[in-house]
Image (cartoon, grey):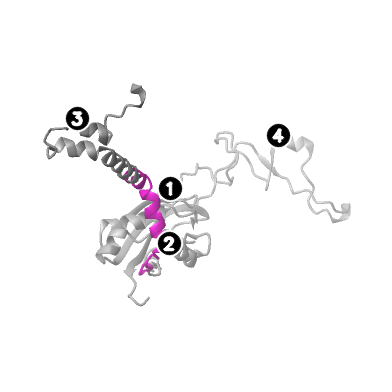
Amino acid sequence: MFGKLDIFKRQWTDVIFRGRNKEYGAYELRNTNARTTNLALIIGSAVFVFLISLNTIINAIEGFIPKAPEKVKLSEVKLLPPPPVDPAKKPPPPPPEPPKPKVTQVKFPPPVVKPDNEVKENPPTVKELQTADPGQKDQKGDPNADINIDGPVGNSDTKVTEADPNQIFAAVEVEPHYKNGGAAGFNAYLSKAVKFPAVDRENGTQGKVIVTFVVEKDGSLTDVKALRGPDQSMMDAAVQAIQQSPRWVPGIQNGRPVRVQFTISFAFSLADSDN
C-alpha cells in the first residue's frame, strides 16, 4: 500500500495545503519539484559531458582553421676566414727525430711471390731474428732506451719531448672542416638545426651571432661559446645547434691531428611580409 505512495504528487500537495495559504512558496516548490529536478539533472549532465569533451572539441576546431605560415627566414651562415698568415713569423719546426729502439731491428721486407732471380732483398735469417726484431729498416738499438711498441723509431739518442698535447691552434697546415660537404654542408646543417626563438620572432628581434668553438683531435666540437649577439635567447639557440653538430675532420699540424679554434658568424633575420 505504502510502496506506491508518492507524497510529491499534486493530489497529496492539495490535501496538505487544503484550507491553507497556497500563495506560500512551499506550495509552488512542491508542485514544480519534479520538473526542477529533471531540468537540473539534464543541465548537470550536459555541463559534465561538455567539460570532458572540451579538449576534443578544441582540437576539432583547430583542425579546420589553417595556421598562418611563419614569416621567418634564416640567412646563410658565413664562416669567417682564418686569420692572415704573418710572413715574418717562422713556421713551426719539423717534428724531432724519434729515439732509437731498445732492441736492434733488421729490415723485414714484405713477402712478395717472385722468381728467385728477381728477388732483390732477402729476408732476415732465423739467427738474425734471435737477437733483433723485424722492422722497416736496419736500426741499431739502445739498451737504455724506453720500450716503444707502436711509436716510430729513429737514430736520435735523446728521448722525444712532445709539445703540449692540449695546445689550441688558431691556424694549422690543414684546416678542420665539416665532414659532409665542408663549409656548404655546415651551412645546410645549421639552416635546419638553428631554431629562431619564438620570443624574438614575436618581438621582431633580429641580428648577427658570433660563436667560437674548438675542433678536437677526434673531430668533436667543444668549448662552444657565443661571443656576442642581439640577445641571450639567440645566442643560446646558436650554441645549442653547434653543440649537436656531427663530428668534423680534425685539423692537421706536423702530420698529427691537433685542437683548432674556429669562429663562425651567422644572422637571424625576419623575412619580409611578402616572402
Choose the circle earlier in sequence order: 3 or 2: 3
Pointer 4: what residue? 131
Q: Residues within 10 Å of mark 4 (few under 14, many from 20)?
A: few
Classify 39 as above or below 191.
above
The residue indicated by pointer 2 is: 190
Are dots 2 and 4 in contact, CB under 8 Å?
no
Tag 1 near tag 4, CB within 8 Å? no
- Residue at x-position 28% and y-position 42%: 35
Q: Nearer the viewer, mark 1 or mark 3?
A: 3
Our reading of the magenta stretch's main secondary structure is helix
Return the mark for residue 216: none
Relative to the observer, which residue lies in front, 274 or 142?
274
Question: Which stretch did the figure color magenta?
Answer: 47-73
Name the mark nearer the viewer: 2 or 4: 2
Could you tell me if residue 12 is visible in this image? yes
Q: Earlier in the sequence, mark 1 or mark 4?
A: 4
The residue under label 1 is 163
Which class describes the residues within 10 Å of circle 2: few (<14), some (14-19), or many (20+)?
A: some
**Mark 4–mark 3 contact, CB under 8 Å?**
no
Label 3 sits on residue: 16
Q: Nearer the viewer, residue 123 or 60?
A: 60
Residue 86 x %, y %: 37, 67
C-alpha span from label 4 to label 3? 129 Å
Q: Position of residue 89 (x, y in %)?
A: 37, 64
